[in-house]
Amino acid sequence: MSEINSFNELEEKLAMLAGPGINPGLGRISRLLLLLDNPERKFKAIHIVGTNGKGSTSVTIASILKESGYTVAVYTSPHLISPGERLVINGKKISPDRWQNSLLKVEELIKEDSSLSEKPPTYFEIITAIAFFIIAEEKVDIAVVEAGLGGRLDATNILKNVILTLLVSISIDHTEYLGNSLREIANEKFAVLRKDVPAVFQGGDDYLNSLFLQQAKKVGAQSNILSDICTFNTTKLSEDGTSFILEKNNSAVLYHTPLIGFHQTKNATLALIGADILEQKFNKIDDKAKKIGVSKAKISGRFELISKKPIFILDGAHNPAAMKELVNTVAELFGKTHVNIVITMMRDKDIKESLTVLSKLNCSLICTEVPGMSRSMKAFNLAREAQKIGLDVLSTNENPLEAVRLALSLKGITISCGSLYLVGFLKNNIADLI
């Protein structure tokens, strides 16, 4: 059986075992981890929380630590093609057999426990518990753990040995679970701050910064806002990545990350400042490891250049803030070149505002859907919303592959965005496109 098929089978078993949908709360995962002998207590962790940029920041600080000679686990979500992507140790995925065996153990524990069998953990809680179990078994030096949704009631907030919290940008998203206002959403995320644990916030407006400092003071966390520590400026944006200068303590260093976008300067800087703080406990971290680590950071589906001739880009932007970063990056790299955008969005996202941001580009839309996903907005409904705000809609097609083929046949560049699920579907079928 191929690796993909093995992970598909794993995903099917996970879905069958899990309780329905998203159900925030720490009770179920707390019980499950107790039955697994509390693996979350057995490793040091960096907790990455926020709206946009968690994945990029996670892989960057992990790359720095790996380059410093440490064994590093990275737990991220969601996956693009298979659940095996969610956990890597020193850049290598865990084998399907290891996942399957761990799942069998968890399945047995759930069935034997009256409370969990009656109210099963969610998909995310189960896969998080398995990841923590494997991380503990591997005896890694440190784990980089990305929060799934929010913070306060997110399954990852069960971690007991967090030594650093990094908070990326915060904006409106997941309102049905986190609240309708920026204040409510920020408070959910800032609730992960821990007494005596250093925390660095990428920063926002004065209001967000004030909320962060208030919560840090309330719980006794060591608070840092990026702009108070350093300055950073993008010096060059190209199809090969992003170069930037980081200035602090009267010194300036030029870095390069293969991740593309002005926002990747902020994400890499957050990771670098996090690495500075970790130097006190991880003394093998040095300037060379930081520079090489940043230069080797990789993550799929974030302004990922799939092809240069024709230009074809996959980007997981799915909320207004991420769309703004996408628009800024496209404008810098390609100017006023016409952009053919293959797009779908989940029905629960801020579709109107996201489309409004895209309207700043010289673009045409081809609206599509994610096959088999009920959350995906119907292509014709998305097209109607786009037309309401004056966007040019070339076509609708339920089949994303046909939509991309059409876009690639047209003059200009092709970008697929609006959902990481769409990005994952296209990556899984990339051989049929390029």
Image: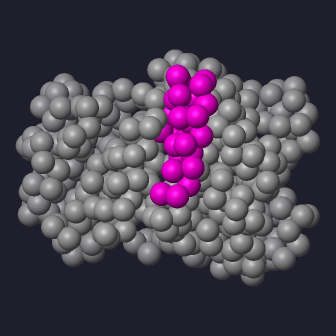
Q: Which residues are magenta?
A: 100-128
Tell whether 166 sits left or right of 173.
right
Indicate the position of residue 218 as horizontal and vertical percent values.
87, 26
Residue at the location (78% across, 36% down)? 193
User: Which residue is found at the position 22% from the left and 62% from the top?
Assistant: 429
User: Looking at the figure, which quarter contains the N terminus?
Assistant: bottom left
- Residue 63 vs 425, above or below: the answer is below
Which quadrant of the rendered structure holds the C terminus? bottom left
Q: Is residue 265 visible?
A: no
Q: How many marks?
A: 0
Q: Position of residue 169 (x, y in %)?
A: 60, 42
* Residue 182 falls within the magenta-colored stretch: no
Q: Position of residue 418 (x, y in %)?
A: 32, 43
Determine whether, in the image, residue 210 is placed left or right of residue 315. Answer: right
Question: What secondary structure prevails in the magenta region?
Answer: helix
Taking depth in this image into account, of 228 and 63 the one nearest to the observer is 63
Q: Height in image: 420 above or below 230? A: above
Q: In the figure, residue 391 lies in which quadrant?
A: top left
